[in-house]
Image (cartoon, grey):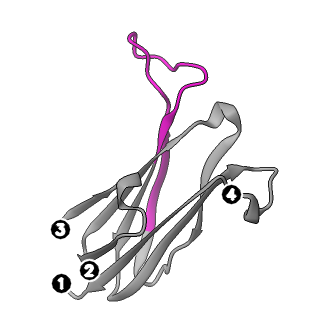
């Protein structure tokens, strides 16, 4: 099993993965400003979401820092061959989907192991 790490730098990228691999996507998020990332699309027959966590910003004492950006992290398991687009939008929850402040898309091309 291989682990593929993705971040903002891979926005628009295509990655070749194999069934059984894991894909970990980490994006900066400032929840205290009302913005958060939400998963808009992912073909669950190719990539299955196994965890969705948020890591708050840490100060020098190890606690959270108000107003700082943390990291939103998703872990996907590649469960089938095919093509899946991970599509996310960054917006305030009270705004419409078309009002996203940012978007992220990466294409996973999965082959049988």
Do we see residue 71 in this rendering? yes
Q: Secondary structure at mark 2?
A: loop
Q: Earlier in the sequence, mark 2 or mark 1?
A: 2
The residue to which callout 4 is attached is 100
The N terminus lies in quadrant: bottom left
CA separation in Å, label 3 and label 4: 34 Å
x then y, percent, for residue 97: 74, 64
**62 magenta-colored:** yes
Distance CA(mark 4)–CA(mark 2): 32 Å
Secondary element at image label 1: loop
Q: What is the C-alpha distance between the residues marked 2 and 1?
A: 5 Å
Mark 4 vs 2, N-terminal side: 2
Q: Nearer the viewer, mark 3 or mark 4?
A: 4
The image quadrant that residue 89 belongs to is: bottom right
On residue 113, the disc is: 1
Q: Which residues are magenta?
A: 49-72
| The C terminus - image quarter | bottom left
Label whose residue precedes the other's in the sequence (4 or 1): 4
- Residue on which disc 3 sits: 1
User: Mark 2 touching mark 1, by CB under 8 A?
Assistant: yes
> According to the image, label 2 marks what residue?
19
Please name the residue shown 63% across and 47% down the image: 36
Between discs 3 and 4, the one toward the N terminus: 3
Residues at marks 1 and 3, CA–CA distance in whole angstroms: 9 Å
Q: Secondary structure at mark 4?
A: loop
Residue 60 is inside the magenta segment? yes
The numbered mark, 2 or 3, whose residue comes first in the sequence reads 3
The residue positioned 60% from the left and 20% from the top of the image is: 66
How crowded is the residue under tag 3: few (<14 C-alpha within 10 Å), some, or many (20+)? few
* Front-most of residues 81 and 70: 70
Judge the density around disc 2: few (<14), some (14-19), many (≥20) Cα neighbours within 10 Å: many
């Amino acid at each position: 099993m291989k682990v593929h790490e993705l971040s903002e730098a891979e926005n628009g990228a295509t990655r070749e993965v194999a069934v059984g691999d894991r894909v970990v996507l980490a994006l900066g998020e400032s929840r205290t400003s009302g913005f958060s990332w939400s998963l808009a699309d992912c073909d669950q027959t190719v990539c299955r979401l196994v965890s969705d966590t948020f890591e708050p910003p840490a100060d020098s004492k190890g606690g959270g820092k108000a107003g700082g950006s943390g990291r939103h992290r998703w872990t996907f398991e590649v469960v089938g061959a095919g093509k899946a687009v991970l599509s996310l939008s960054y917006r305030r929850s009270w705004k419409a989907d078309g009002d996203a402040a940012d978007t992220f898309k990466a294409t996973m091309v999965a082959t049988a192991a």
